[in-house]
Amino acid sequence: MSRLQQQIKLIKRPVGLPTNEDFEFIEAPIEEPSEGEVLVRTVYISVDPYLRGRMNDVKSYIPPFKLNSVITSGVIAQVVESKSPKFEKNDIVIGSLGWQHYSVAKESEIRKVDANIAPASAYLSVLGMTGLTAYFGLLDIGQPKEGETVVVSGAAGAVGSIVGQIAKIKGANVIGIAGSDEKVKYLIEELGFDAAINYKTENVKMALNKACPNGIDVYFENVGGEIADAVFPLLNKFARIPVCGAISAYNSESIDIGPRVQSYLIKTSSLMKGFTVGDYGSRFQEGTEVLAGWLQEGKLKYEETVTEGFDQTIDAFLDLFEGRNIGKAVVKVSEIE
Ligand code: NAP
């Protein structure tokens, strides 16, 4: 008889903020790999805000999760059994895999990671999807120049913390907006941001006015809503706005309507451009190499909020909407052997 494992399935489409009732832990057999496949043990699960969008039954850049199927996200895993010439037992791999203890993956669905460059979990953060999002969104769309002012929201999170540091590498003045005094302190003291604003306790408009006496040249948008509303009046001529995310609206039950942006964009000839990291798929190797170089030179730091235990995966995901993470939120499911 095959061994059993736990999986997490989406059983209801969340309305507003998801709750534990939208998910179910179930027991299922561990599958056997066929030729060209490997059996892997989950080590780290990435929990990400974009997964919330996949829980809705709406058309997007990535298909919605099917009800009663296992949720998937970025996973670091270790090979237990290989039926592929490309992988050996104990290799550390990354792929978009299920929220479960063990997965069978086709050899084309996973790739090896080099744990000599950085700890394996870094391939879910600074050297993975969120680091690449920061790199391409900021440099390709934001294009910060020396002496310019860059504002980033969601600044202490996985993407925002890397955006701010890359902007510093490019010689910009960097202002972060985040949701606690601890995060503000972290941004200034640990990451070298020039200023940071706690949007939960400060008047963001007034604080931005003070922190950006020369206006704003780049606004890296992670959250949308009232924080973005406070930024638009301060845009400089030819400002750039990479629109990466809008987490403040992800759990909204009604359409998010705020001040219209058109007049600000026209007056300032600003560029506002949405993107997904997948747009830059053909340049991932370049991005990873540059980020790894900065990491090794000590120019880039990264933080992780590691939640221990598979049974805490839903809570770790929900914590994103409460701002409980600093840096990348991951769940540690097992040890690397
Ligand atoms: P993250 O910033 O590590 O975690 C989410 C953070 O959002 C929380 O820690 C919280 O920090 C903040 N937040 C939660 N609810 C909020 C609200 N109502 N208003 C303002 N801030 C709120 O997540 P991430 O992975 O780096 O993602 C950041 C953004 O980028 C998300 O919008 C995500 O969807 C987007 N993203 C886009 C791409 C792409 O390809 N376009 C790729 C990755 C991520 P505070 O304590 O500061 O509130």
Image (spheres, helix red, strand yellow):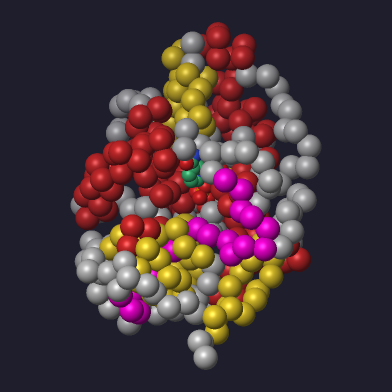
Furthest-bottom residue in view? 1
- As drawn, is 9 to the left or to the right of 189? right
From the image, give the main secondary structure of the stretch colored magenta.
Answer: strand
Q: Is residue 250 above or below residue 150?
A: below
Q: Is residue 221 visible?
A: yes
Measured as percent of width and height from the top left, residue 323 is found at: 61, 54
Q: Which residues are magenta?
A: 63-82
Rendered residue at 73%/28% (across/down): 257
**In which quadrant of the rendered view does residue 286 lie?**
top left
66 is within the stretch colored magenta: yes
Give left or right: position of 112 versus 61. Answer: left
- Left or right: where 128 falls relative to 159: left
Residue at 68% from the left image edge and 19% from the top image edge: 260
Asked whether residue 247 is drawn in magenta, I would say: no
Up-down: is 79 above or below 314? below
Q: Which residue is at 76% across, 66% downward? A: 21
Image coordinates of residue 76 in percent, x first then y, are 40, 66
**Residue 337: x, y in percent?**
32, 82
Count how many numbered circles sit on residues in the image. 0
| Residue 303 appears in the rendering | no
Outermost residue on the front side: it is 35
Horizontal side, residue 139 vs residue 269: left or right: left
Q: Nearer the viewer, residue 19 or 108?
A: 108
- Depth order, front residue of 337/67: 67
Residue 225, compared with residue 57, is above or below; it is: above
Looking at the picture, how far across and down is residue 274, in whole percent?
A: 51, 29
